[in-house]
Amino acid sequence: MAKTDQVQNIKGSMLAFKLCKLIPQFPRIISNIKKAKGINGDSTESIGKVIESKAIAHGNVVALRYEDQSYTYLEFNQVINRYANYLLSEGVNHGETVIVYLENRPELLFLIAACAKIGAIASLVNPNQREKTLIHSLDLTKSKFYFIGEELLPFFENVRDSLTKTKEDNYYWVSDRGAGNCPTHFKNVKNELEKVSANNPATTQEIKGKQVYANVFTSGTTGLPKASLQTNRKWLATYYWFGKVNMNLNSNDVMYVPLPFYHTNALIVGWPTALAGSCTMVMRRKFSVSEFWQDVNTYNVSAFIYIGELCRYLLNAPASGLDKKHRIKKIMGNGLRPDIWLEFKERFQIKNIFEFYGAADGNVGFTNTFNFDCTIGWSPQNFKIVKYDIENDAPVKDPNGFLVPVSKGGTGLLISEISNEAIFDGYVNKAQNENKIIRNAFKTGDTWFNSGDLLQDIGFKHARFIDRIGDTFRWKGENVATAEVEGIISQLDSVEMCAVYGVKIPNNDGRAGMATIVKHGNVDFEIEEIANHLLEQLPKYAVPVFIRLKDKIDFTHTHKIKKFNLKKEGFNCNDEVFVKLPKSETYIQLNKDLLKEIGAGDHIF
């Protein structure tokens, strides 16, 4: 039997058994579910207050470890205070945006927390962004305060003259490993921090739950990143939900977070979960397969956060004596696919997998509280899974014009009701909010958030993630917007038309980018030119793995590219196809032997 066939609908007897085992924990679970659901926008509970309370109650416990650096909860709070007080001294006001362009290191977290304490907004620009995309993101959130990591300075300087500027712009250099010299037009942040107080800023007491503390960039179908608003209330909801209802760690635990804090998995799942348990969080610059289990051993890790691709990489790595030599009993993350779930659990002897579902721009979350295999778990919020016509890319409606929920076992589009208890915070660009709202879904006047994801209803408010719909697909843990890639490809004179979409590759998570190109008849076409152009203009995860050459591309009567058949045909088609193999920066023609290897899952992209 295939592993995916082992996933069945949840039966009442199974749920009853799980509930009985959790009876002793019911008071804790129910109490924290209520807290997670009941955070009021006008409440003065905030991220800053949580950090300050931990400094008092657990000051000597190590809060953060990164490479050879270590900070207790007291020291962690003091460093954040220095950043917060420095921002205030520089004129960063309540509600003001601060651009933060850093790779994944403690200074990134310090700046996020500092902004949260003073009511400012850290705009977390993805460090993989370059050129046009970087300009868009830097200009989108309109700031006069730019905190630039030493490691990213060349990329920022490359676009600085193209940004919308004011006479009040301020540039701050955040040194990295102390190797370089601060540019003349920048202020050296770490030198400046020595001059300011480490005391708690008074502003923390004024922050409310509805206050935005960060912008997290997510790729949308518009082709360029959207900045989603992250509030204290949303962070606190995950603090209680993921941290206290599910993982329930304590000060003896060590939580390993090898994911980037400019994305929500680390920022509003991993970090608040560690804080909720008053435990140590281990931060890593970049995930490494070869060093993962060594890190687990070095830091005595007891829990970690994952994305599905991370798990697949670990499973594909050669067996090691460290595979089972650890104290990990709990892990949390999303995207662990059913085809490797049981094998991963068995090989690494991990008892509890708290798979979850959520989105940076969403208002609904699921968690595998009861530890069922191959499920994203359940949600206490009001959601529906409705019938969806994939080919026509639209929800199915009944004769009255209302949406139709799927029956148990059915697959459809996840939507969640927007209410005072389930706020949709939306985006910096308010015009983009309406694209994610479904009105009059089941009755006149109701409003629902459109997740853009297909889920399977497996009963008892539990679901299984199936796939994403529309033009955005996920690859390498990132959302890839096809319109952006199509725009970059179309800049070339040798390209008359193109269509970009995601395709499945055996033994790889997510969908790899594939571009179908119609060559311009009057211009020489060189595959090397395509490769160089894409690698220069796009983040690596957005560069198509496959390029297909075709005589024409079909359109709908509304002038939309017909991608359904292109996706269905994939890379195993009769046209000329090129592939960029792992660790290669060039494309080679796909032949029968190479097609057979890829089809057998021999290449991990």
Image (cartoon, rainbow, N blue to C red):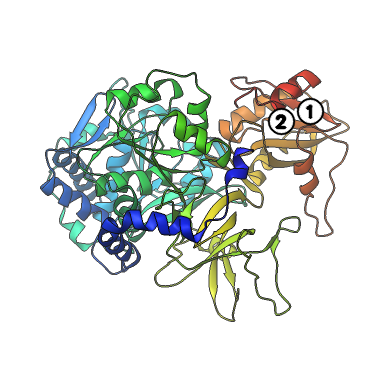
Element assignment for label 2? strand
Q: Which mark is residue 577?
A: 1
Rendered position, 83 above or below 382: above
What is the distance, in whole Å, between disc 1 and disc 2 at their CAs? 7 Å
Element assignment for label 1? strand
**Residue at 56% of width from left, 50% of height from top?**
465
Q: Do labels 1 and 2 touch, CB within 8 Å? A: yes
Residue 421 image offset from top left, x and y in percent: 39, 70
The image quadrant where one finds the C terminus is: top right
Q: Nearer the viewer, residue 561 or 303?
A: 303
**Residue at 71% of width from left, 74% of height from top?**
398
Left or right, residue 241 beside residue 309: left
Provide the residue designation for mark 2: 546
Give whichever of discs 1 and 2 has the lower sequence position: 2
Q: Looking at numbered disc 1 in the image, what kind of residue is underneath it?
A: Val
**Residue at 61% of width from left, 60% of height from top?**
413
Rendered position, 77 above or below 424: above
The image quadrant where one finds the N terminus is: top right
Left or right, residue 569 beside residue 437: right
Left or right, residue 195 beside residue 120: left
Residue 242 image offset from top left, x and y in percent: 35, 51
Q: Looking at numbered disc 2 in the image, what kind of residue is underneath it?
A: Phe
Q: Give the image quarter of residue 213.
A: bottom left
